[in-house]
Image: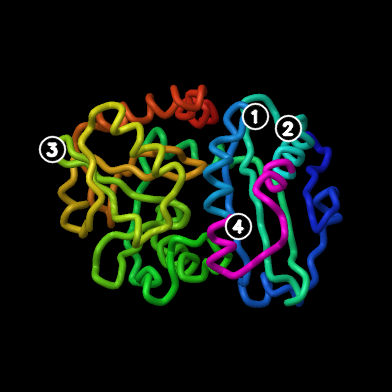
Amino acid sequence: MSKQERFTYLNGEILPESEAKIPFRDRGFMLGDAVFDTTRTFGGEIFRLDEHLDRFLNSLKYMRMEPNLSKNEWQDLTMKILELNLPLLDKNDDYWVSQRVSRGDGKNYTVIVESLPLPFEQRAKYYKDGLPTIVPSIRRTPPDSMSPRAKVHNYINLVQAELEVQSRDPDAWPILLDSNGNISEGPGANIFIIKNGVITTPKEQKILAGISRQAAIDLAQELSIELHEEDIDLFDVYTADEAFITSTSFCIVPVSSINGAEIGSTGLPGPITDRLQKAYSGMVGIDFVEQYLSRL
């Protein structure tokens, strides 16, 4: 990155990040009373902004927030911040790009659009060795308490899971069970398993359905790979031939193990995961696997 500072949008102003200040009594800070969404760029081109903004606006509606910005206005603000910050990226880097709204002081909303470079160096090893996963003792917040389909700032459930898992293995990713003992999701990530050539992933109603998750589902259909959305328990994961997670930053990354038990025996990535990674790269116009591996 250049030493020049990135810009952010805050409450009607475009500012250098160091000048973007939020009051400590903001409800987003005090209560986690905030909504956000995040996409990424590929070669500087933003990925599925339309779908991300639809999810963002649905999350705002769920949280009864009305910041009085249309979808087109959100799109224009997002593209403006990206346009200002793209010249600061080094070659072969890309951004996370996020929209955020908190309830502010209870009368006036706090509205933010910002970007952050993707952590390619920190995550490159997972494309070579696979991503180890651990199931923590903490269960995912049940849908009858709060819908997981809204993308909100209240991540304490996932943070606690992450802290527990990282105390056991700093490189591992948490995969939480739901209250019935089925696989749900991880922080910012959806899980898929493959058995006998068939892909299975948890039902949308019990998770935050990722945009990258839907992209993988669409690609599986295009490749004529059978896919089901249904409950998955730990037995299914332990006996899977392959597993992978999807997320905005990872796109598709192979899972190497769960709770220390190796998944599959065909090497990483497995054959179906490899097909999906290649198809995903073709869709976005960049070999995202190589984009990570080039940092090793």
| Residue at image mark 4 | 36
The answer to whether the residues at label 2 and label 4 have Cβ atoms under 8 Å apart is no
Instruction: Describe the element under mark 3 as helix, strand or loop.
Output: loop
* Colour mapping used in the image: rainbow
Q: CA distance from mark 2 to mark 4?
A: 21 Å
Q: Earlier in the sequence, mark 1 or mark 3?
A: 1
Q: CA distance from mark 4 to mark 3?
A: 38 Å
Q: Is residue 276 above or below residue 173?
A: above
- Stretch in magenta: 57-76
Mark 1: few/some/many CA within 10 Å (<14, 14-19, 20+): some
Left/right placement of residue 180 relative to residue 88 reads left
Left/right placement of residue 102 relative to residue 255 reads right
User: Which residue is at a point 49% across and 62% down the rendered structure image?
Assistant: 150
Residue 27 seen in render: yes
Q: To which quarter of the image does residue 177 belong?
A: bottom left
User: Which residue is at a point 40% across and 71% down the rendered structure image?
Assistant: 141
Instruction: Describe the element under mark 2 as helix, strand or loop.
Output: helix
| Residue at image mark 3 | 196
Left/right placement of residue 133 relative to residue 224 reads right
Main secondary structure type of the part rendered in magenta: helix
For the residue pair 257 and 24, the one nearer the viewer reads as 24
| Residue at image mark 1 | 44
Three-letter residue code for mark 2: Leu
Residue 61 sits inside the magenta stretch: yes
The location of residue 213, given as percent across then percent down, is 39, 44
Mark 2: few/some/many CA within 10 Å (<14, 14-19, 20+): some
Q: Earlier in the sequence, mark 4 or mark 3?
A: 4
Three-letter residue code for mark 3: Asn
| Residue at image mark 2 | 86
